[in-house]
Image (tube, grey):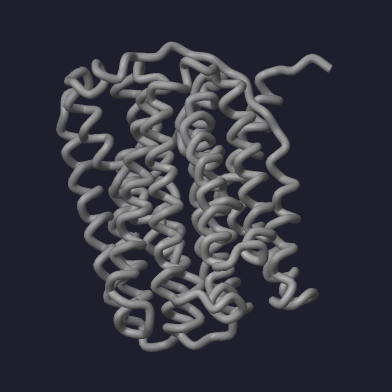
């Protein structure tokens, strides 16, 4: 069978589903780690920082080495690392003297795979033939959201049938997914030349804020629902992170279909305001279900922020190439690691967790200011 760009696009979609598994399966197991493995909440919160910290390191190295080893080899390695990490997550905690060490090693392996995947897939899709580049990018990132939904729903179903006592088999089953490979090549600009562009720095700031706005709620939604709102785990997972992912996927899918009719910059500005409203509702709502609705609203609002920033960067910096996407992935992961860490420092129970989530509102506000600055710039200015 002759492979075409449609096969590459389908493989890219599967790659982002794998990325969703890598980033969102472990947070669903936080309570299990605490109750079954005896790992403290403080050490559990460090897993988020380690995950995105390793991804940031991979992003940084990718800016130089991806073009040396080749895209095909790199993306195959990414899926191998992801599969190995998921298997290790189910095996190593019971094979190490300290279960936390096993979990930590598994998270690091997954993060290496996730970091490479994040760097490569967006530029691969950007290079494919398409009449609506922004719409294609939004649809690509929508598959991350639907992957997130699948992780929550299928994992919740697994726990309902097998119980949390057999949690270790779950990540091993998810390891079946990372089986695809991708291929592609493109023009790239030297990293030093990229960093001389003022526009690149503005987009890096936007990526930090986009990652922070998304993961501040996404990573803690399950634990927030269970410990802060006192709802059962199944309801918390379905109405917290699952609803967040559904709404994020919905917004990206809708923009992917109708985005050509909408101003991307105006859409992102409105999404920033909606994001602040979602965080505020989650924190201040007097009823648990209304707080969970705030989580869902936040998911809808952040949907376009990450892929939208990618798409705008290709308009203003069309020669950026793989190095630019590696820098953006690095900046996004800085934001992803920053806000969950802020939330963790604020404390993990009740009002302290809400205070941490409230602090995350600063990032969509900052992103709104950056988008406004971008709108005032002449199109050709660098």
The number of numbered discs placed on residues in the rendered structure image is 0
The residue at 61%/49% (across/down) is 85
Compared with residue 40, is residue 24 higher up or lower down, i.e. above or below? above
The residue at 22%/55% (across/down) is 365
Percent across and percent down for residue 142 are 55, 45
Identify which residue, 338 or 124, lies in the foreground: 338
The residue at 36%/67% (across/down) is 278
Outermost residue toward the right?
1
Side of 139 where 6 appears, left or right: right
Compared with residue 206, is residue 296 higher up or lower down, i.e. above or below? below
Q: Is residue 120 visible?
A: yes
Percent across and percent down for residue 340 are 36, 62
Compared with residue 228, is residue 111 higher up or lower down, i.e. above or below? above
Side of 322 where 365 appears, left or right: left
Outermost residue toward the front?
97
Where on the picture, by quarter, is residue 329? top left
Compared with residue 335, is residue 345 higher up or lower down, i.e. above or below? below
Q: Where's the N terminus, which quadrant?
A: top right
Identify which residue, 88 or 14, lies in the foreground: 88
Where on the picture, by quarter, is residue 150? bottom right
The residue at 54%/53% (across/down) is 105
Q: Is residue 253 visible?
A: no
Percent across and percent down for residue 191 are 30, 20
Percent across and percent down for residue 296 are 47, 66
Identify which residue, 345 or 360, lies in the foreground: 345
Side of 161 where 246 appears, left or right: left
């Amino acid at each position: 069978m002759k492979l075409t760009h449609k096969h590459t696009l389908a493989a890219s979609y599967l790659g982002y589903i794998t990325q969703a598994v890598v980033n969102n399966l472990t947070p669903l197991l936080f309570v299990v780690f605490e109750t079954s493995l005896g790992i403290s909440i403080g050490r559990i919160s460090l897993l988020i920082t380690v995950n995105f910290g390793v991804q940031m390191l991979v992003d940084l190295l990718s800016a130089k080495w991806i073009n040396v080893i080749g895209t095909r080899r790199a993306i195959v390695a990414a899926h191998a690392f992801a599969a190995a990490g998921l298997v290790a997550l189910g095996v190593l905690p019971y094979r190490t003297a300290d279960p936390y060490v096993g979990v930590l090693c598994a998270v690091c392996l997954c993060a290496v795979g996730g970091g490479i995947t994040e760097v490569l897939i967006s530029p691969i899709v950007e290079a494919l033939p398409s009449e609506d580049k922004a719409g294609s990018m939004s649809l690509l990132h929508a598959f991350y959201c639907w992957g997130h939904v699948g992780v929550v729903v299928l994992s919740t179903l697994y726990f309902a049938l097998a119980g949390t006592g057999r949690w270790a088999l779950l990540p091993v089953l998810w390891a079946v997914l990372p089986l695809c490979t991708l291929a592609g090549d493109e023009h790239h600009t030297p990293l030093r030349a990229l960093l001389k562009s003022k526009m690149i720095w503005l987009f890096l700031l936007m990526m930090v804020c986009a990652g922070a706005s998304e993961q501040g709620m996404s990573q803690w939604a399950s634990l927030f629902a269970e410990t802060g709102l006192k709802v059962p785990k199944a309801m918390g997972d379905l109405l917290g992170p699952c609803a967040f992912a559904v709404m994020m996927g919905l917004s990206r899918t809708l923009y992917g279909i109708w985005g050509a009719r909408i101003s991307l910059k105006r859409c992102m500005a409105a999404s920033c305001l909606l994001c602040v409203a979602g965080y505020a509702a989650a924190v201040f709502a007097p009823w648990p279900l209304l707080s969970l609705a705030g989580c869902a609203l936040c998911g809808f609002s952040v949907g376009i922020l990450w892929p939208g920033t990618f798409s705008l960067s290709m308009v203003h910096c069309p020669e950026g190439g793989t190095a630019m996407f590696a820098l953006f992935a690095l900046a996004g992961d800085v934001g992803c690691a920053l806000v969950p860490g802020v939330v963790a420092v604020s404390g993990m129970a009740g009002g302290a967790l809400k205070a941490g989530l409230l602090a995350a509102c600063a990032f969509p506000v900052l992103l709104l200011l950056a988008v406004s600055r971008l709108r005032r710039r002449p199109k050709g200015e660098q």
